[in-house]
């Protein structure tokens, strides 16, 4: 009797999804060759985004296509399904998935059956019910948002340069970032660097005309690098005329006016939201156990607690930290996520072969953060670095972590060339409306930026913000 192959379903193509599938196809190489195992990856995008490079992509230091890794090339022994998992019925071992084809056909979701489930849908922006945020807020989790934000910032400088209205000019040159974690600080620092450089090519805009504001509810920024380095980062940013507001919240951004909890009001056309993440909504549409924060309850072996044949890691999983006191969980950052995938893939293979499982244990060693070109902070093995050495370590670390030699070589080549030539100051806002020119020529409405009913409208996030329960702050992979 022919034995049925073990069907492994990986939901998500981010850090956990891609790395787990990659390691599974290596670990189960012989089983895959013999037809004893099948790996299916369901992901909304055909690529994995290396999020720590988003700030540099926004600043123009790295090409957008080099920030992403094509899954079909890397996972050549896996079946890739581009679609969105809407629900999982683990009792029946089925997942309901909506693909581009099902939308075109007008059919309902397809059902994918499995024997082993890896849930790695990642996280979405954690938003709050702040008036105006859904209308005017800009996210910073995807490569599309990063490039859109770059285009938006340069477009605001174009508006300020050409307007005769002082109020419009001031609002266009005011940029508010909410969230003092890695994403917020690195995005603001890189874009401020880029905009300050770009201003030299405008006849009527000086670097000091641009107003950058960082709003953070806690009493410090970058908590992962330690209190001393966090204070240094604040001093460094303030020395660049960046207004850092600690223990402050944004209460409203209606009508393009950012109202802060300290009573300040800033007319602005740019509000960037980087105040943490929360688990993907898919988790609530499963029959698997969740904790109070909406993450999957997991064991140290990366199995879903109390459930057989279900596995999870990364942002979606609440994994006990065996290196800390009882009750502590691993932080939902990519440093843990990438490390967890190695144990996860080995444990799935061990489970299929009837071998014992391992526990995930990783002691946190340090963190690095960029504060713009040639500037950074780091806290490694108890040693504190700042300025150029920290920035160099930040680049070296992330170059070592970005997947595939192809991407490493391309990123290194771009860094080398950017050091030899001047910065790019091009805004390609028309990429967001590629058919606008043809539609105008064909007699349709003009939807280019600056034309039509949405004249210089807000940059919309890729996924509409949803008010949700408090989650944990997200970050890219850091020094381990």
Image: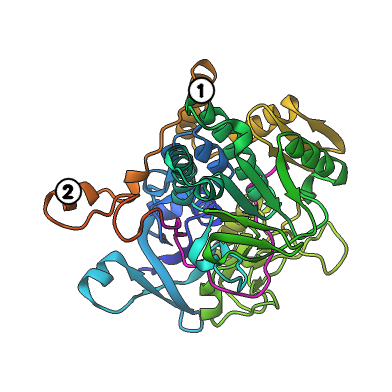
Q: Which residue is mark 2?
A: 438
Give the label on residue 362, or none. none
Dot 2 or dot 1, earlier in sequence: 1
Measuring from the top left, give residue 108's x and y in whole percent: 29, 79
Q: Please tell me which residue is depicted at 53% across the width and 56% down the height of the picture.
A: 139
Measuring from the top left, give residue 3's x and y in whole percent: 39, 68
Is residue 195 part of the magenta span, yes or no? no
| Position above or below: 413 against 356 | above
Q: Which residue is mark 1?
A: 418
Residue situated in front as seen by the camera: 285 or 297: 285
Residue 181 in view (yes/no): yes
Residue situated in front as seen by the camera: 46 or 307: 46
Question: Would you call the spot at circle 1 few (<14 residues within 10 Å), some (14-19), or many (20 or more)?
Answer: some
Q: Quadrant of residue 312?
A: bottom right
Horizontally, is 64 left or right of 311 in the view? left
Name the element at disc 1.
Answer: helix
Q: Please tell me which residue is depicted at 56% across the width and 72% down the height of the picture.
A: 309
Residue 335 in view (yes/no): no
Residue situated in front as seen by the camera: 64 or 270: 270
Is residue 478 part of the magenta span, yes or no? yes
Horizontally, is 472 left or right of 14 in the view? right
Q: Which residues are magenta?
A: 457-480
Measuring from the top left, give residue 196's x and y in whole percent: 58, 31
Question: Would you call the spot at circle 2 few (<14 residues within 10 Å), some (14-19), or many (20 or more)?
Answer: few
CA gap, disc 2 to disc 1? Answer: 34 Å
């Amino acid at each position: 009797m022919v034995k049925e192959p073990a069907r492994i379903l990986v939901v998500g193509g981010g850090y956990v999804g891609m790395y787990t599938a990659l390691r599974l196809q290596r670990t189960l190489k012989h089983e895959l060759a013999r037809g004893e195992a099948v790996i299916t990856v369901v992901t909304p995008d055909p690529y994995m985004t290396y999020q720590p490079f988003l700030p540099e992509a926004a600043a123009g230091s790295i090409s957008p296509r080099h920030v992403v890794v094509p899954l079909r090339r890397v996972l050549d022994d896996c079946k890739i399904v581009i679609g969105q998992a809407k629900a999982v019925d683990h009792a029946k071992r089925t997942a309901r998935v909506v693909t581009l084809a099902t939308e075109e056909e007008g059919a309902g979701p397809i059902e994918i059956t499995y024997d082993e489930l890896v849930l790695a849908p990642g996280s979405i922006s954690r938003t709050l019910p702040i008036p105006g945020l859904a209308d005017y807020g800009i996210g910073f989790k995807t490569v599309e948002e990063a490039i859109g934000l770059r285009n938006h910032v340069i477009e605001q400088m174009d508006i300020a340069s050409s307007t005769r209205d002082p109020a419009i000019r001031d609002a266009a040159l005011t940029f508010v970032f909410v969230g003092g974690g890695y994403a917020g600080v690195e995005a603001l620092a890189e874009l401020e660097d880029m905009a300050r450089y770009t201003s030299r090519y405008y006849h009527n805009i000086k670097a000091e005309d641009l107003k950058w504001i960082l709003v953070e509810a806690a009493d410090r920024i970058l908590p992962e690098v330690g209190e001393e380095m966090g204070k240094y980062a604040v001093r460094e940013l303030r020395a660049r005329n960046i207004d850092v507001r600690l223990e402050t919240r944004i209460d409203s951004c209606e009508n393009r006016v950012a109202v802060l909890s300290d009573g300040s009001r800033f007319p602005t056309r740019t509000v960037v939201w980087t105040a943490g993440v929360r688990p993907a909504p898919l988790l609530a549409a499963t029959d698997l156990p969740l904790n109070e924060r909406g993450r999957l309850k997991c064991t140290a072996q990366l199995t879903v607690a109390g459930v057989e044949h279900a596995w999870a890691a990364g942002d979606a999983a609440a994994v006990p930290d065996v290196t800390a006191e009882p009750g502590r969980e691993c932080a939902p950052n990519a440093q843990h996520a990438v490390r967890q995938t190695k144990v996860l893939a080995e444990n799935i293979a061990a489970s299929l072969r009837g071998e014992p499982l391992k526990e995930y244990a990783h002691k946190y060693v340090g963190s690095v953060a960029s504060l713009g070109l040639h500037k950074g902070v780091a806290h490694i093995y108890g040693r504190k670095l700042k300025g150029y050495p920290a920035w160099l370590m930040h680049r070296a670390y992330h170059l070592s972590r970005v997947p595939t030699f192809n991407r490493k070589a391309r990123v290194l080549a771009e860094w080398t060339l950017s050091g030899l030539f001047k910065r790019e100051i091009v805004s390609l806002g028309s990429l967001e409306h590629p058919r606008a020119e043809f539609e105008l020529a064909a007699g349709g409405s003009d939807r280019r930026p600056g034309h039509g009913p949405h004249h210089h409208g807000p940059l919309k996030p890729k996924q509409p913000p949803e008010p949700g329960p408090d989650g944990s702050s997200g970050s890219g992979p850091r020094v381990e």
